[in-house]
Every structure is written in C-alpha cells, then in structure tokens.
Image: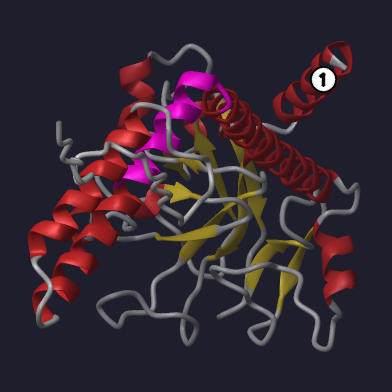
Amino acid sequence: MKKFSLILLAALTTLLSAYGQGARNIKINEVMTSNKASITDEYGRHKPWVELSNIAYSSYNIRGMYITTDRKVLDKSLTVPQRISMMSIIPSGDDRTLLTARTHVVFYLDSHRAEGSFYIGEKAMPNEPMWIAIYDGNAVDLIDSVSVPALKDDCSFAREKDGSVKWEIKSPAEVTPGTNNLLKEGESKVAKLKREDPYGFGIAILSMGIVFSCLALLYVFFRVLGIFMSHKQTIKKAVNIQPVKAAVAAGGVIAETGHKTKVILKDGLQSSGIDKEVYIAVISMALKQYLDGVHDNESNIITIKPHSTMWNAHIEEKHF
C-alpha cells in the first residue's frame, strides 16, 4: 500500500510539474489597434488594447513582466537597461495582476502609467501593422509575441481559442476582450469542457484532488474513532476492577441510605406520637450492622435481625 501511494504521488507530482504554472503559460490572446466603439477604459475613453491570458490551471502573478511594441528589443547585443527603456513594466501593488486559472486581463495602449496599473505607453497605430511582445521579469526572456496585421476599426486579431496557435481577424461583433475567444451560443457544458480541456488533464487533476481529500477525511475519521474505542475499553477495564466495583457499590448504598434517612426523619417529625430519636436509633443500628457485615446484600431493603439482650427481663424474686 505504501509503495502504491508513493508511485501515485510521484505521478501526480510529475503531472503538476508538466502543467504547472509559469511565465510560459501567459499568452497574448487578443489585440485591437483601432478602438472606435469597442470597450471603454475607466475614464470612458476608447483606447487600443491587448489582452493577456493565463492558459494554465493554476494562478500566476504577471507583475514585473514587460510589454513592448518595439522590435529593436530583439537585438541580442542590447544590455538589460537598454531593453527596459524600450518596454513598459507591469506594476506590482495591484491584486488584479494575479491571474487565476484560465483568466484574462486587458491592458490599454497609448496611455500614461499614472492613469492606472493597466495603462501602458506602448504605441498602436490605427489601421497599421504592429508587433507586440511580452518579456519575463529579467527583460531578456521572450515569453510570447505576435505580428498584428492592419486591422479595420473595432476589429481584433485573436487566437482562434485561448492558447491556440492559430490566429484570426475578428469582426466587431465577435470581439471578446476579457473573456474566452471561442464562444458558442447553446453550447452544452460537456461540449465546453471538451473544448477547454481536450486532453482531460484539468478534470484528471480535479478528480485526483477529490479522491485524495476523501481519503484524508476517512483517515482522520477512523483515526479518531480508534482512539475513542481504545479509551472506551480502558475505562471498561478500570470499572471492572474489584476495588472500584466495591467503592461504586458502597457509594450507591450510602447515597440510598442517606435519601431514606431524610424521608424517615421527615415522616417521623410529621407523625404524632412518634419520637424522632427512635428513627435515628433504628437507622444507626442498621448502618452499624451493614458495616459489620451483618446486613444482607438485598437492594432497597434494610434488614434488622433481632437479638435478645435480656435487658428488660423480669428478675424473679427468690424467697428463702
């Protein structure tokens, strides 16, 4: 069982490593160079934009990455400071830069950095071709790039579906900023799942996560149950020990006798012509006999065995 668990854990680790999140899973997903009637920014303006997508099944923070539209950065002889001067950095300090699984974010071009976290100064010439790229935080490693053809107003250049290799020009009615590129009306959940996860890796990871969670819960449940049953058996054994049983029995008898004493005293005081000292004497005698081992073992019964003491016998007078 232990060997099987290790093999399963190794397989899961390998699968997660292969499809684990990293900068390579951040893709340029859609670009619009001439925005006349498409989405508006926070200030109500129509700005050209670029959409980035996280195609992985885990989260990744894109802060510190760079976006550029200057092809000169492809020159390998450039120093890092020279490259950075040709790029716009994605700032930190904004929670929205943390892209969860299969999510998107839109950056507005031709803007000033002071306008907000998602405004960059990279230029986009309307109705003209454009090259755009994203670089890792070292400003050297190219993560993704695309050459955008000349686009008509409100048209976009987008991947056929998120993360795919094939690109296409979308009409204004088909533009999908901030959401999946491939949308179909009336599509069933099963069809959507097949489209978004064609190889089943996402559902496999989800299923294994559920199985491992259930196994962990079962382990905790039976572990706690085992501890409880162990303590229960220990308590039973302790109760069955003779000194403990004798103490419990004696305690019960004493409690019962005390209760009956209260009842007798109460009844005696309320009865006319009966002296309470008589009751006390009877109870004291019964307790004395119980402690001396004379009392029998019947429950709820106080047995008093009479003994002749001859203290009230008449003394016969003898006459000589």
147 sits to left or right of 284: right
Residue at screen point 73% across, 47% down: 210
71 sits to left or right of 108: right
Look at the image and tell me whether residue 2 can be seen.
Answer: yes
Q: Position of residue 164 (x, y in %)?
A: 79, 51
Q: Quadrant of the C terminus?
A: top left
Residue at screen point 37% across, 55% down: 96
Q: Position of residue 110 (x, y in %)?
A: 34, 60
Q: Position of residue 185 (x, y in %)?
A: 80, 87
Q: Position of residue 315 (x, y in %)?
A: 18, 41
Residue at screen point 63% across, 77% down: 175
| Residue topped by disc 1 | 5
Residue neighbourhood size for the residue with mark 1, other residues' Cα within 10 Å, grouped as few (<14), some (14–19), many (≥20): few
Element carrying mark 1: helix
Q: Count the numbered circles shown.
A: 1
Which stretch did the figure color magenta?
240-254
Above or below — where is 279 with respect to 135?
Answer: below
